[in-house]
């Protein structure tokens, strides 16, 4: 159940930056290769937040596809599964461009309901 520890880390980051203000929404980006199940992450998050500044907060999870650049033929392809393999030449010598992200992309705090001020960007969990 690694989603629970990820949810805890996200909650910790949000609480630290909110400094006691209510958090309305948290946007997180999760790379495909992290193999996080969004439903499990949302569920774990909902277990942690009651009674905290994050109570009722929306957790928006953006899935980031894994993309690799082939060192052999130069093609870029979306990588679905291990082993990571070039979509054109099926080579295994791949430079990973995206897919390993796991970060809190943005927080929305209650004070700025109309502008949704971005107080913080890009904290790795
Ligand atoms: Zn290739």
Image (cartoon, rainbow, N blue to C red):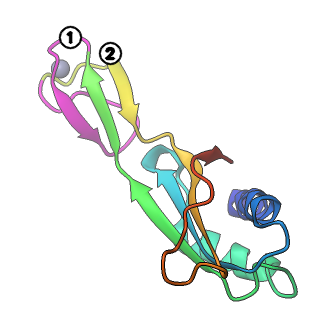
Quarter-wise, where is residue 14 in the image?
bottom right
Does the magenta run of residues contain 73? yes
The relative height of residue 81 versus residue 51 in the rendered view (above or below) is: above
Q: Which residues are magenta?
A: 71-88
The circle drawn on residue 72 is 1
Q: Is residue 83 visible?
A: no
Q: Magenta region, mostly helix, strand or loop? A: loop
| Magenta stretch: includes residue 92 | no
Residue with the mark numbered 2: 93
Q: Position of residue 4 (x, y in %)?
A: 75, 64
In the rendering, which numbered label is found on residue 64?
Answer: none
Q: Earlier in the sequence, mark 2 or mark 1?
A: 1
Q: Residue 63 placed where, x, y %? A: 42, 59
Seen at 76% across and 67% down, the residue is: 18
| Front residue of this view, candidates 35 and 102 | 102
- Along the line of sight, the residue nearer the viewer: 125 or 119: 119
CA distance for labels 2 and 1: 7 Å
Residues at discs 2 and 1 in contact (Cβ within 8 Å): yes
Neighbours of disc 2 within 10 Å: few (<14), some (14-19), many (20+): some
Q: Is residue 68 left or right of residue 26?
A: left
**Does the Cβ of the disc 1 residue fall within 8 Å of ligand 1?**
yes
């Amino acid at each position: 159940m690694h989603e629970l520890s990820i949810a805890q880390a996200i909650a910790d980051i949000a609480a630290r930056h909110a400094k006691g203000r209510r958090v309305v929404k948290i946007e997180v980006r999760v790379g495909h290769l992290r193999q996080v199940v969004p439903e499990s992450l949302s569920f774990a998050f909902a277990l942690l937040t009651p009674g905290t500044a994050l109570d009722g907060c929306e957790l928006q999870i953006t899935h980031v596809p894994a993309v690799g650049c082939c060192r052999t033929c130069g093609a870029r392809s979306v990588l679905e599964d291990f082993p990571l393999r070039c979509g054109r030449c099926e080579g295994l010598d791949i430079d990973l461009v995206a897919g390993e992200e796991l970060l809190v992309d943005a927080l929305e705090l209650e004070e700025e309901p109309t502008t949704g001020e971005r107080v913080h960007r890009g904290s790795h969990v």
